[in-house]
Amino acid sequence: MATLNDTTVVLDVGARYGVHPSWNGFDAPARYIAFEPDPEEANRLRDNVASTKYFSYEVLELALDSAEACVTSICCGTAASVPS
């Protein structure tokens, strides 16, 4: 089973569909922060995803930009351009 270290933070920008199933089964501490500006969808996410012993889940009801754009994301020292 895959594990995460205790410093892992997941940022889900535009979290409309919630936690991807690939995160199921991780048994090390992780903090998952979902950004979802749509109030109805944010409430649905809060109702459907529960925090567990190892997995804290937080929904922030806000957008990270005011328009669609392409941004550069840096993860583990690797840069990747992704649509926002």
Image: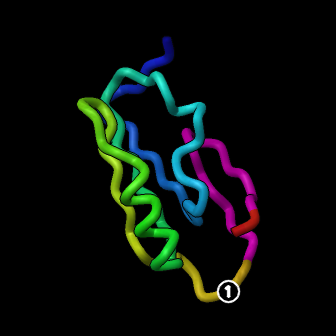
Residue drawn at the location 68% of the way across and 50% of the way down: 79
**Camera-nearest residue between 10 and 21:** 21
* In-image side of 36 versus 68 (left or right): left
> Which amino acid, by three-letter code, is at mark 1?
Ala
Identify the coloring: rainbow
Q: Is residue 80 magenta?
A: yes
- Residue 64 in the image, given as x and y percentages of width and height: 52, 76
- Relative depth, front residue between 38 and 27: 38
Instruction: Name the residue furthest top.
Output: 1
- Figure disc tally: 1
Which stretch is magenta? 69-82
- In-image side of 34 versus 58 (left or right): right
Left or right: 10 with respect to 7?
right
Q: Which residue is mark 1?
A: 67
Residue 14 place in picture, x, y as percent: 59, 65
Residue at 48% across / 76% down in the picture?
Answer: 40
Residue 76 appears in which quarter of the rendering? Answer: top right
Q: Residues within 10 Å of mark 1 (few under 14, many from 20)?
A: few
In this view, 31 is above or below 34: above
Query: Is the stretch drawn in magenta largely helix, strand or loop?
Result: strand
Residues 18 and 11: in front is 18
Location of residue 76 with respect to 41 vertically, above or below: above
Please tell me whether residue 65 is drawn above or below residue 78 in the rendered image. Answer: below
Magenta residue check for 33: no
Q: Residue 56, image x and y in percent?
A: 30, 44
Residue at x-position 38% and y-position 57%:
47
**Residue 84 on image: x %, y %:** 69, 69
Residue at left 45%, top 69%? 42
For the residue pair 62 and 71, the one nearer the viewer reads as 62
